[in-house]
Image: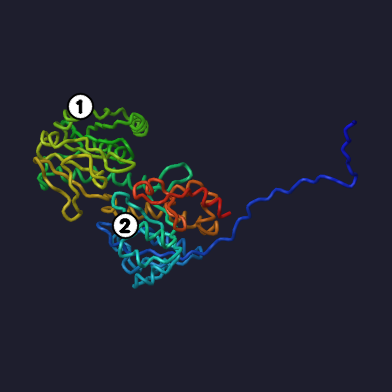
Amino acid sequence: MTPKQPYISSGFSYETLAETLDIKPSSASLSIAIPKENAFQENRIALTPDAVGVLVSNGHRVAVEYKAGEGSHFSDNDYAEAGALIIHDKKELFKNDLIVKSAPVSDVELPLLTAGQTIISPIHLPVMKTHILEKMMEKKITALSFENLKDESGHNPIVRSMSEIAGSAVMLIAGQYLGSVNSGRGVLLGGISGIPPTKVIIIGAGIVGEYAARTALAVGASVKVFDNNIYKLKRLQNNIGVRLWTSVLEPKILAKQLKTCDVAVGALTSTSGRTPVVVTEEMVSMMRPGSVIVDVSIDRGGCFETSEVTSHEKPIITKFGVIHYGVPNIPSGFARTASQAVSNVLMPLLLKISDEGGLEKLIWHQLNIRNGVYLFKGALTNFHLSQRFELKYTDLNLLIASQR
């Protein structure tokens, strides 16, 4: 049996299908609220008056709580002149769609949150509480964290800026407490002609360590850096462009160097949980009386066994004759600079959110922004938070795809 030949009709034709493209949405007008922070030692504000002026001139509504900028030396008048509304009632302020904060959501603010709001703030993992997360999930909140927010180059811009401030400030703080007035060794940080330079030990070769090393070298100090991550040590060496004394964290070498140093800086980081303790009480007891320890990693437990959390009002304690500075959130002590750094990242982000027609549409196009989203319409999308607090995790990529 011969197979049937296919029948082709002359009236049948193929046509190319036109490619369908995403149509750019019309920009959305945002209503942004900036509350006054009541958190311990938080002086920063998330948007400066200049940034507010740019947002208002782009057609957005910005409400600022009464005296919210006081800690950063920005007055209500500065904000009013930039076009912001000054609100006295916190309850009224939280009726806006988008809340921008420089501290995590507190227990006081939790009842004020309204369903479906968007919050941009830090999360401060070590002090995060389960009930705050659960309540935000219940209220279908979408939340973006400072710590995990990434730019197009894959870096965390706000964390990097805060680390640069902390690293640079560390040496200014150490220099102050080395002086005789503060019962320090009475030596000048750095050195002058004919006198050996002061010796600085930095534990941790991240951004804080790098900027601490830069500042110490700039004033003429002798710098020695410890870290177990060889890549970080190489990067620090390349970025500074000067041959530095570096070492892995070997206890005997570290103890020997600490005995003769004037300043020791703890700048180790930990991606999850507590910072490892690498300097024991015994090592500290062998240090010179009047030398200074600045433990930048104190907000994650600290890497010196003798470190304790202190405040900006009472910043130091003395143990074994060694001055310990353990103020967490060092950038908040330089609140105006820190606020400008945060604002420089958030203002363009808010303009992008508006241009794309909302945060949901922006994260469809900008994959790097997804990294900062830890709650999406009440669903917990950060794996580390779900593991730590034993809450249900949902993949953000799947959530976004299902919305399209």
- Residue 345 shows in the view: no
- The reply, left or right, for residue 276 in relation to residue 357 is left
Q: Position of residue 188 (x, y in %)?
A: 16, 40
Side of 355 where 115 appears, left or right: left
Which residue does the image show at 81% across and 44% down from the upper left? 14
Q: Distance between the residues labelled 1 and 2?
A: 39 Å
Tell me the element at label 2.
loop
Kind of residue indicated by mark 2: Arg
| Number of marks in picture | 2
Task: Check disc 1 and report the residue beneath it.
Answer: 253
Q: Which residue lies furthest to the front in this view?
A: 1
Residue at the spot of label 2: 44
Q: What residue type is labelled 1?
A: Ile
> Circle 1 sits in a helix, a strand or a loop, which is it?
helix
Q: Is residue 354 found left or right of 105 in the rendered image?
A: right
Residue 101, image x, y percentages: 36, 59
Q: Residue at x 63, y 52 (%)?
A: 22
